[in-house]
Amino acid sequence: MKGLFFMEKLRKTEFYRQLFHKLKEKHRQKEVENMEIIFGMTGTLFLGLMFLAAGRFFLEKEKKLKITGIKTIAKITEKKSGYRKSLLLTVEYTADNKVIKKKITTSRFLFFLEKGDEVTIFYNKNKPENFCFENDKRYIVRSGLFFFAGLMEILASIAAFFTWILK
């Protein structure tokens, strides 16, 4: 009789040990899953902030160049259609009594000048090769794309957070 009681107790102990082990394993898997979700949300939030910073950088770069740059007149000396919807332009201007020819690639939809047209530009006095057009939409579009991507990443991170919390 004592042997049966001992065996039954042992079997119950083994059952509880296995049950405890399964619960512990399930809890560990849940912790790992939560860590993955937290890392994903944090990474998405960080990426969104990086996109916002890049958008601000491009916007501020043009503003600064227009404030501190030297205003001059440039001439479009070459205009070619590029790959897909791109446009290859050669811009020529004088900076510090030196003629500078700069090739740029832009979108056909953002640039409506023709070969031979003159346009107002602002160039960096320390690096005359860096310039921007007076009414340049490229920086605004580029900044807008980065701002949009940043906001979408941040919204995705917030949505993931609330989905995780309410789960």
Image: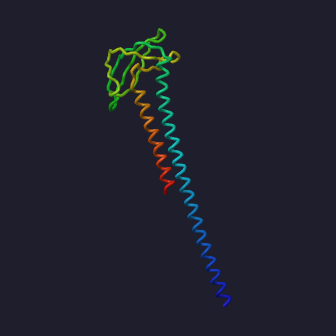
* Residue sitting at the far top: 97
Residue 22 position within the rendered picture, expressed as x and y whole percent measured from the top left: 57, 68
Looking at the rendered structure, the number of numbered marks drawn on it comes to 0
33 vs 18: above or below: above
58 vs 40: above or below: above
Q: Residue visible at 32% across and 26% down?
A: 81
Q: Residue visible at 48% across and 42% down?
A: 154
Residue 106 position within the rendered picture, expressed as x and y whole percent measured from the top left: 38, 27
Q: How is the image coloured?
A: rainbow
Q: Residue visible at 42% across and 13% down?
A: 93
60 vs 146: above or below: above
Q: Residue visible at 47% across and 8% down?
A: 97
Q: Quadrant of the N terminus?
A: bottom right
Which of 89/24 is in front? 24
Residue 88 position within the rendered picture, expressed as x and y whole percent measured from the top left: 36, 24
33 vs 99: above or below: below
Residue 30 position within the rendered picture, expressed as x and y whole percent measured from the top left: 55, 60
* Residue sitting at the far bottom: 1
* Residue sitting at the far front: 166
Which of 88/106 is in front? 106
